[in-house]
Amino acid sequence: MRRERRMLSRMGDVTQGSRSRSGNSGGSEGGRAAVVIGGGVIGLTTAVLLAERGMSVRLWDPQAPEETTSAVAGGLCWPYRIEPRARALEWAVRSFRHFAWLAEQPPLTGVRLVRGTMPDSVPPPEWSALTGTPPRAPVVDMTSYLPYLLGRFEAAGGRCERRAARSLAEAAAEAPVVVNCSGLGARELVPDPAVRAVRGQVLVVENPGIEEWYVAASGAASETTYFVPQPFGLILGGTAHDGAEDRTPDPATAEAIVRRCAAIAPALAETKVLEHRVGLRPFRPSVRLEAERIPDGRGGESLCVHNYGHGGAGITVSWGCAVDAARLVGPPMRTS
Ligand SMILES: Cc1cc2nc3c(=O)[nH]c(=O)nc-3n(C[C@H](O)[C@H](O)[C@H](O)COP(=O)(O)OP(=O)(O)OC[C@H]3O[C@@H](n4cnc5c(N)ncnc54)[C@H](O)[C@@H]3O)c2cc1C
């Protein structure tokens, strides 16, 4: 755990944030208390960081991690379908460093550094400097990684509660700090009409021996062609349909994905399909990562830090965004 703290402090000093002027003290054992809303990769990562800084953190989500959009993701760390580009790149670069460290313990974390090809895109120099040429990027097995994050959160004293926040005020009534990582749920919770779903469909197939990832995806195209090797099979993708919300896999779409991938790797034409998956990317024209003060329902105020709208790159930017969210939360101990 000490090594993890050292690693995070190298990513950015998270103890120098602004001081809270919260009227709601609600801490435990002298530390400040927080409710994190949302247990996908964004909420879990942020909750880990806050709990490891000594805050008393409760994580609210009516769903288990394996039911989230985060569990559907291909798991390749690459800044795709996320805005604003420049900030996303900074978050991705900082996250890369932490993922590279997690990749030193792949069976535990589910993170590996894997070589691949992206024929259609010229990555920004900051990204190429990290990934090399040809690129070697983090590939995250979400079936291992989400439980790893959960274990790390609980080891740091965090508590998971299977409950939905009906409003931000409900959470504010229970803690001086609320961190809103509700993804697509922010549409209703905030409410924020700028958040919209970008539907993605993928398949998991038996891997005929492919060890490198391949991605042909332009930012705006609704059909992409990619495969990502994972320990449980090869993920084939994909689609990106703006505003579509049907979570049922479409057989014709699945066939078209296999055809496109087989045009690149012919062995994929005959491979056995293990699973169909659909997820809704929580897209926003600009990720919302900022703080505001909200009423706590008792005449005081709580600090609310928003961290949502990460579109097609939530895993890729998760650690960088969590560090910025922690800065906005401020120091772990109560100061007023
Ligand atoms: C097909 C597909 C492939 C993808 N591939 C990649 C990839 O290779 N690399 C990458 O970086 N990204 C990828 N993504 C994008 C990535 O999955 C998302 O950006 C990421 O999962 C967003 O994480 P999140 O935690 O914000 O949202 P989610 O995982 O959706 O979690 C949000 C959680 O908030 C909870 N919630 C909502 N409202 C409330 C409330 N009122 N109270 C309590 N809880 C609430 C929900 O129940 C949910 O569990 C992919 C997405 C899809 C669909």
Image (spheres, grey):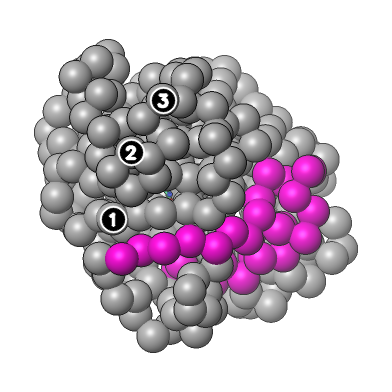
- Find numbered disc 1 in the image and state the secondary structure of the residue it sits on: strand
**Disc 3 residue type?**
Glu
Label 3 sits on a secondary structure element that is loop
Q: Residue 59: x percent and y percent?
A: 59, 33
Does dot 2 land on a helix, a strand or a loop? helix
**Residue 52 visible here:** yes
* Residue type pointed to by label 2: Ala
For the residues labelled 1 and 2, the Cα–Cα distance comes to 13 Å
Residue in front for this viewpoint, 197 or 225: 225
Mark sitting on residue 216: 1
Looking at the picture, does residue 179 appear above or below residue 103? above
Counting from the top left corner in percent of width and height, residue 171 is at 47, 32
Q: Is residue 16 left or right of residue 325?
A: right
Q: Is residue 200 above or below residue 110?
A: above
Range shown magenta: 91-119
Question: Which residue bears the numbered disc 2?
Answer: 262
Residue 270 found in image quarter: top left
Foreground residue among 129 and 57: 129
Locate the C terminus by quadrant.
bottom right
- Disc on the earlier residue, 2 or 3: 2
Query: Which residue shows up at 70% across the image and 74% down it?
Result: 9
Numbered label attached to residue 270: 3
